[in-house]
């Protein structure tokens, strides 16, 4: 094992219904060759012959914002990043992310051995923009191993897709297998996040998928399958690819893959909860609900089913019935990220469209001027690809502004004005960036409101923002460094 803390873990009790292990396997993004639909089909093929490991895939699972942390922080802590103490790298008074109330700490308190594995340390969830961990977060932690391998790959210039004579993903899965074998008599919680084959490109993703299928089939043939719950998911859909620039790609980004595999004994013991989960498959869910579900799994026998008004509640366990009428507005999920809205196409030559696009570019350039020493070039309009509009009903609270420069805190007012949302896909120079931005127009005040967090970069920027990667990480998708 790569690293570990002193273990004080109770052995499993005889009543295994109270001690199901939990394994979360997450891969970054879906890609051009592996969409939500394709992954769903391949997963069905992998499970053929293993009907006792029936899977449940959420069809209405919606992301909360742009990038990995905006999904994983709510999923693993139950809070948005802005609701927690600052851990920003550029904030000198910030804390390490150890201060977050991570779900694995709750499992550890209940006697579970915990593990966390994430590759690609240079793009780490907790280190690219945040300060990272000061101490080892779980009993077993793979970061030291990947940090060493990252150094070796740079020093000796070998392909990071392989480690010795194995693919890096096979090594990753082997570690998980070793973890399970080492603690066969203990309760276990493991969070695994693999990025190597999908972060920068998609050509090697088929290797990942075949290895994953083999791993699942082999796992199904062991005794561990009888007491292990597996959650297979992606953090978000494709963000930078040709398919992302299509209507299908827009939905793919906002509706990532989220699937649960429950062992047969769990389905028998908790048949009532499984029936409720089946109803929730087609309802609007977010990472907040996954967090509540993880809390429920710590002790299923303490589940309560008193009738409550859950409509406005953002954290609902999938073992509780989620309202069929639940909306993005109920969850304060901004229109830019909501997959439930009906947008209408608009002519790209419309006068308001040109005004809106200029407003957005000016807004971006204003943010770039905040960079010390003027490291980034100012952006210029190049072309408009497409435009859609959405006019909310009168009950929708309207976005007013964003109160922090990271675009994490949307504020709303209660004026029921006639608001129109413009979602514009446009291209800028000199970075040849393609953006999908949502801006809010008020007929009453005749002006636009834009939030930095509602502007998506939908083609890759790679190293073009290397000059501010750490110091102004929130502007990476906009900055084109002055050479």
Image: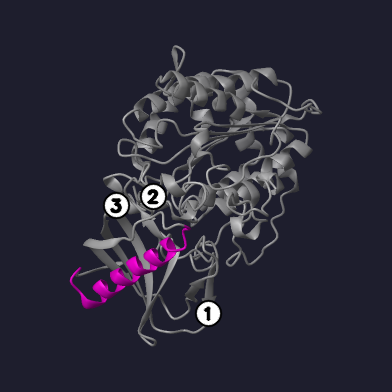
- Give the label, 3 or 1, closer to the camera: 3
What is the x, y in percent for residue 169? 47, 24
Report the disc number at residue 431: 3
SS label for mark 3: loop
Residue segment shown in magenta: 348-372
The residue located at (43%, 59%) in the rendering is 337
According to the image, label 1 marks what residue? 413
**Disc 2/disc 1 C-alpha distance (Å):** 28 Å
Residue nearer the viewer, 60 or 75: 75
Disc 2: CA contacts within 10 A as few (<14), some (14-19) or many (>=20) = many
CB within 8 Å, label 3 to label 1? no
Residue 229 position (above or below residue 398): above
The residue located at (65%, 20%) in the rendering is 1
CB within 8 Å, label 3 to label 2? no
Q: Is residue 137 left or right of residue 383?
A: right
What is the x, y in percent for residue 157? 41, 21
What is the x, y in percent for residue 33? 30, 35
Q: Is residue 439 left or right of residue 130?
A: left
Mark earlier in primary sequence (3, 2): 2
Disc 1: CA contacts within 10 A as few (<14), some (14-19) or many (>=20) = few
Mark earlier in primary sequence (3, 1): 1
Report the disc number at residue 253: 2
């Amino acid at each position: 094992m790569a690293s570990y803390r002193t273990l004080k873990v109770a052995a499993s009790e005889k009543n295994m219904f109270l001690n199901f292990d939990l394994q979360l396997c997450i891969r970054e993004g879906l890609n051009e060759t592996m969409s939500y639909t394709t992954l769903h089909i391949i997963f069905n093929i992998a499970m053929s012959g293993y009907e006792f490991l029936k899977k449940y895939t959420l069809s209405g699972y919606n992301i909360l914002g742009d990038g990995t942390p905006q999904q994983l922080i709510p999923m693993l802590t139950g809070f948005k990043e802005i609701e927690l103490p600052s851990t920003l790298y550029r904030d000198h008074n910030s804390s390490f992310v150890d201060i977050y109330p991570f779900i694995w700490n709750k499992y550890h308190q209940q006697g579970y051995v915990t593990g966390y594995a994430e590759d690609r340390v240079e793009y780490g969830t907790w280190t690219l923009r945040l300060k990272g961990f000061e101490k080892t977060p779980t009993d077993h932690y793979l970061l030291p191993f990947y940090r060493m391998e990252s150094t070796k790959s740079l020093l000796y210039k070998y392909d990071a897709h392989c480690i010795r004579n194995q693919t890096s993903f096979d090594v990753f899965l082997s570690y998980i297998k070793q973890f399970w074998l080492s603690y066969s008599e203990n309760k276990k919680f493991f969070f695994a996040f693999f990025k190597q084959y999908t972060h920068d490109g998609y050509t090697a993703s088929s290797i990942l998928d075949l290895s994953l299928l083999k791993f699942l089939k082999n796992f199904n043939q062991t005794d561990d399958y009888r007491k292990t719950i597996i959650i297979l998911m992606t953090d978000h859909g494709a963000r930078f690819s040709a398919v992302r620039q299509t209507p299908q790609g827009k939905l793919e980004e906002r509706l990532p893959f989220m699937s649960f595999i429950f062992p047969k004994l769990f389905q028998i013991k908790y048949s009532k909860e499984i029936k409720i989960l089946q109803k929730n498959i087609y309802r609007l869910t977010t990472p907040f609900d996954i967090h509540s579900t993880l809390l429920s799994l710590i002790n299923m026998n303490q589940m309560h089913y008193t009738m409550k008004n859950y409509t406005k509640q953002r954290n609902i366990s999938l073992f509780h019935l989620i309202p069929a009428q639940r909306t993005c507005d109920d969850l304060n999920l901004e229109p830019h990220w909501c997959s439930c809205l009906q947008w209408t196409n608009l002519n790209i030559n419309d006068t308001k469209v040109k005004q809106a696009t200029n407003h957005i570019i000016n807004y971006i350039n204003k943010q770039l001027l905040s960079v010390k020493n003027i490291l980034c070039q100012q952006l210029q309009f190049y072309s408009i690809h497409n435009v859609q509009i959405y006019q909310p009903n009168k009950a929708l609270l309207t976005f007013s502004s964003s109160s922090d420069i990271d675009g994490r805190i949307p504020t709303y007012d209660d004026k029921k004005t006639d608001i129109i949302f413009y979602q514009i896909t446009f291209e800028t120079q000199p970075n040849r960036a393609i953006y999908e931005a949502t801006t809010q127009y008020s007929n009453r005040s005749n002006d636009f409101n834009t939030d930095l967090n509602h502007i998506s970069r939908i083609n890759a920027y790679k190293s073009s923002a290397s000059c501010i990667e750490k110091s102004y990480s929130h502007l990476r998708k906009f900055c084109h460094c002055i050479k």
